Image (tube, rainbow, N blue to C red):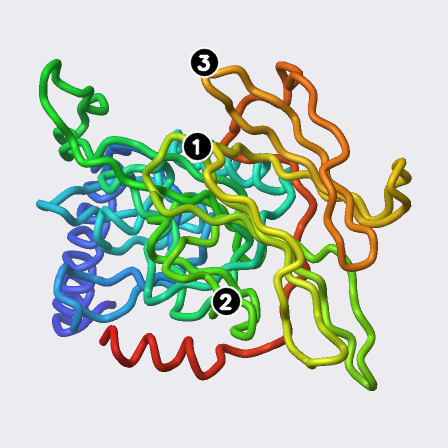
Amino acid sequence: MISVLDRGTLGKHLRVWLVAAALAAAACGRPKPAPPRVLGEAYILPETLDLRADLPRTSSVTAKVKRGEHVEIVGRRRRFVRVRTADGREGWTEQNQLLTPEMARQIEQVSKQAAQTSSLGVYRARDLLNVHLEPYRWSPSIEQLKEEEQVNLLGRRVVDRLPEPPAGGPPPVPEPGKTYSPEEWSFIRAAGGRAGWVLGRMVYAGIPDEVAQYAEGRRITSYYALGEVPDGEQRKKIWLWTTTTNATASYDFDSFRVFNWSRRRHRYETASIERGLQGYFPVTVTASLETRYGTGPGFSFVIAKEGGQRYLRRYVMIGYLVRRYAEEPAPAAASSSPATPPAPPAEEPEESPGFFRRLWRRLRS
């Protein structure tokens, strides 16, 4: 027979079992919480980004993500968004650290365009410099160049400095009768194929200082190596550059100059110079041309004359002399100034910023 104590113990265990069974049944019947509603999609903009448990920067890091990684937006607070990664991790970040799918497609298109475009010369950033998706200050900043970072200049554009568009609204358009300040923007390609638009005055030509010192305050809009001159153990390049006195002019340059190395004086001297032009990119450089004057490196570009008629001028360099050997009406394909002209790249100079460039930056600061 079961004792009274045994019956009491058995009853207590039975009650505990029944309560546990009831709780388990209730839990099974309770619906699981729904996952957060997806508010949108985005891609990570920086090289690396920390997602945090809350808005303050002191919050713990919940995940580390990389550029281009796809995330879902599951929450918003002011300028912050909560995102979820492909493996289910969630965290908060600022909205300007993300790219919309449309912006990601635009960046890909710009990079493809830049990859197919030859360089107008190697340029350097004067300071930390934002790279924009379009040539406007209000356009999203998609990259940042470091001070003295080298980029390839691919083209230029002069635009009106329009006000910032409203959030989510269309780009602004000039108001009739209102005057806006023009700005020069440069289309660049950085290391790794990164591309976009920067303020033109914030980059400078990487041509050696022993040539750059002759710019006389003009903006160097492009430069090219035409050849080399041996001088003892050195090999000095022959340089062609285009310059402008008005960076916001509708044309790309108003003068060109060729610098040859003098083996007798061991310095650069001007082989040819023309000013007062209205020149347009592209500048086409050819390593060797056969002309009635002889054979040598050549170059050509488009100019506009009175009345707006455009002509294609061709030059050849024979020894120390530069001769214009042809001028003809410019074909339609060569008479425009595209943002990304197909011109041969200038070789990247090996020289680091020299004395004059360092002195100028010190005086400027």
Residues packed near mark 2 inside 10 Å, few (<14), some (14 to 19) or many (20 plus): some
Q: Nearer the viewer, mark 2 or mark 3?
A: 3
Going 42% across and 45% down the picture, which residue do you hit?
186
Classify 353 as above or below 335.
below
Q: Position of residue 236 (x, y in %)?
A: 73, 72
Q: Quadrant of the C terminus?
A: bottom left
Disc 3 designates what residue? 307
Give the alpha-carbon distance from disc 2 to disc 3, as whole Å.
34 Å
Tell which circle, 2 or 1, labels the residue nearer the N-terminal end: 2
Give the alpha-carbon distance from disc 2 to disc 1, as whole Å.
22 Å
Q: Nearer the viewer, residue 252 or 94?
A: 252
Quadrant of the rendered structure where residue 360 is? bottom left
Disc 1 designates what residue? 251
Label 1: which secondary element: loop
Tell which circle, 1 or 3, labels the residue nearer the N-terminal end: 1
Quadrant of the rendered structure where residue 262 is? bottom right
Left or right for 97, reference 228: left
Q: Nearer the viewer, mark 1 or mark 3?
A: 3
Left or right for 22, reference 350: left
The kind of residue tagged 3 is: Gly
Quadrant of the rendered structure where residue 65 is? bottom left
Disc 2 designates what residue? 212
Q: Position of residue 282 (x, y in %)?
A: 60, 35
